[in-house]
Image (cartoon, rainbow, N blue to C red):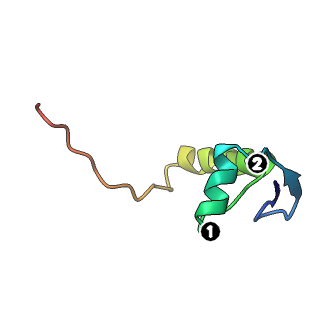
Amino acid sequence: MRVKCVICDKVETIESESLVAKRLRNRPIHTFMCKVCEERIAERTKIRLDTGKFQFNRPKTEEDDW
């Protein structure tokens, strides 16, 4: 299956039977990012987190006593 990265528009080929390919076929909201873009975003996010000025808006989880 040929896919295009949403950030850099690089066309790659992935296995048609892979989980990523299935998600892209069945759910159009899912998008594909190449490994280079994924690594770049992860690296820059880590740098922003280390500055202390960036926070994720994640819901707070409470621990259950069970």
Q: Would you say 4 lies left or right of 59 here?
A: right
* Quarter of the figure with the N terminus: bottom right
| Amino acid type for the residue under numbered disc 1 | Pro
Query: Residue at the location (88% across, 59% down)?
Result: 10
| Amino acid type for the residue under numbered disc 2 | Ser
Circle on res. 16? 2
Q: 38 or 49, which lies in front?
A: 38
Q: 1 or 36, which lies in front?
A: 1
- Point out residue 56 in the picture as x, y percentages from the top left corner: 45, 55
Give the residue at mark 1.
28
- Point out residue 61 in the picture as x, y percentages from the top left corner: 26, 46
Q: Would you say 53 lies left or right of 22 here?
A: left
How many other residues sit within 10 Å of disc 2, few (<14), some (14-19) or many (≥20)?
Answer: few
Q: 31 or 59, which lies in front?
A: 31
Q: Which of marks 2 and 1 is in front?
A: 2
For mark 2, give the secondary structure.
loop
- Point out residue 40 in the picture as x, y percentages from the top left corner: 74, 48
